[in-house]
């Protein structure tokens, strides 16, 4: 492991906005009251990477609590450090495996979920790891408040089509579905937040798919 990664792992141990839950779930069902010390809605970004979307959503919606979730601590470091340096108090980062999400959040605790440019896991043998596979969709259904939304932004046309297929099988009709976000009527201030990777995709004229759905 490089020196930079080791330094970042050491730093996030002391960041007040980073939670690493290797054992126990002290905030399950209590993220708003127990961690953020308020009663505001909780919004998750899954596989948040460097946390650009998490932090920028928190800036736009100070009346909500945002939690970026990823397992790679050296990535979380960037978003957490930005939030601390810029004084964004309504954002936290949780370092866990996403497949264990229900161990850390209670049913109905989450108002909204964002999935921004996840690994599409294109190999058929890795379907269960896709963040919109049936096992994850069933997980989100449990965690979300009634009518809570899931948002998917992806440059991967295959993942977009796969997700639409799985939603159809589950009897879910997307509220918004577009294969070309920035040539649609939906590209508002929130959806125009761009991660590092999205900027690279757009430089190569890649279309961006977007889905918004509720169970």
Image (cartoon, rainbow, N blue to C red):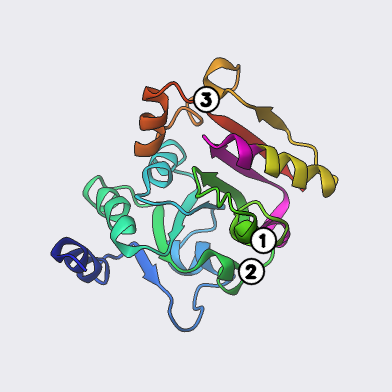
The question of residue 150 being in magenta is answered with yes
Q: Earlier in the sequence, mark 3 or mark 1?
A: 1
Left or right of 142? Residue 196 is left
**Label 3: how many Cα within 10 Å (few below 14, some 14–19, many 20+):** some
**Label 1: how many Cα within 10 Å (few below 14, some 14–19, many 20+):** many
CA distance separating discs 3 and 2: 36 Å
Whole-percent x and y of residue 2?
A: 17, 65
Whole-percent x and y of residue 126?
A: 60, 59
Q: Earlier in the sequence, mark 3 or mark 2?
A: 2
> In the picture shown, does residue 122 fall above or below 30?
above
* Quadrant in the picture for the N terminus: bottom left
Identify the residue at image location x=55%, y=16%.
183
Q: Quadrant of residue 202?
A: top left
CA distance separating discs 1 and 2: 6 Å
Magenta stretch bounds: 136-160
* Front residue of 118 and 173: 118
Whole-percent x and y of residue 14?
A: 24, 70
Q: Earlier in the sequence, mark 1 or mark 2?
A: 2
Q: Is residue 24 visible?
A: yes
Marks 2 and 1: in contact by CB < 8 Å? yes
Left or right of 177? Residue 205 is left
CA distance separating discs 3 and 1: 30 Å
Q: Quadrant of residue 142?
A: bottom right
Left or right of 20? Residue 118 is right
Q: Nearer the viewer, mark 3 or mark 2?
A: 3
Q: Is residue 105 visible?
A: no
In the image, which disc is placed on residue 207?
A: 3
Q: Which residue position is annotated with label 1?
A: 143
Q: Which residue position is annotated with label 2?
A: 106
């Amino acid at each position: 492991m490089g020196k930079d990664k080791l330094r970042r792992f050491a730093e996030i141990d002391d960041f007040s906005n980073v939670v690493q839950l290797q054992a126990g779930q002290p905030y399950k069902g209590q993220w708003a009251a127990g961690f953020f010390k308020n009663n505001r809605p909780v919004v998750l970004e899954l596989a948040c990477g460097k946390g650009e979307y998490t932090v920028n959503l928190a800036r736009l919606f100070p009346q909500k609590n945002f939690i970026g979730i990823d397992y790679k601590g050296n990535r979380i470091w960037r978003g957490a450090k930005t939030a601390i340096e810029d004084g964004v108090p309504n954002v936290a980062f949780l370092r866990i495996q996403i497949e264990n999400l229900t161990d850390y959040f209670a049913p109905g605790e989450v108002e909204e979920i964002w999935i921004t440019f996840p690994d599409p896991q294109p190999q058929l043998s890795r379907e269960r790891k896709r963040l919109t596979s049936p096992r994850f969709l069933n997980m989100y259904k449990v965690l979300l408040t009634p009518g809570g939304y899931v948002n998917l932004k992806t440059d991967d046309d295959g993942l977009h089509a796969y997700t639409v297929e799985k939603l159809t099988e589950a009897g879910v009709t997307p509220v918004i579905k577009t294969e070309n976000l920035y040539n649609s009527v939906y590209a508002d201030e929130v959806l125009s937040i761009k991660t590092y990777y999205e900027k690279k995709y757009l430089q190569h004229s890649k279309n961006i798919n977007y889905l918004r759905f509720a169970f």
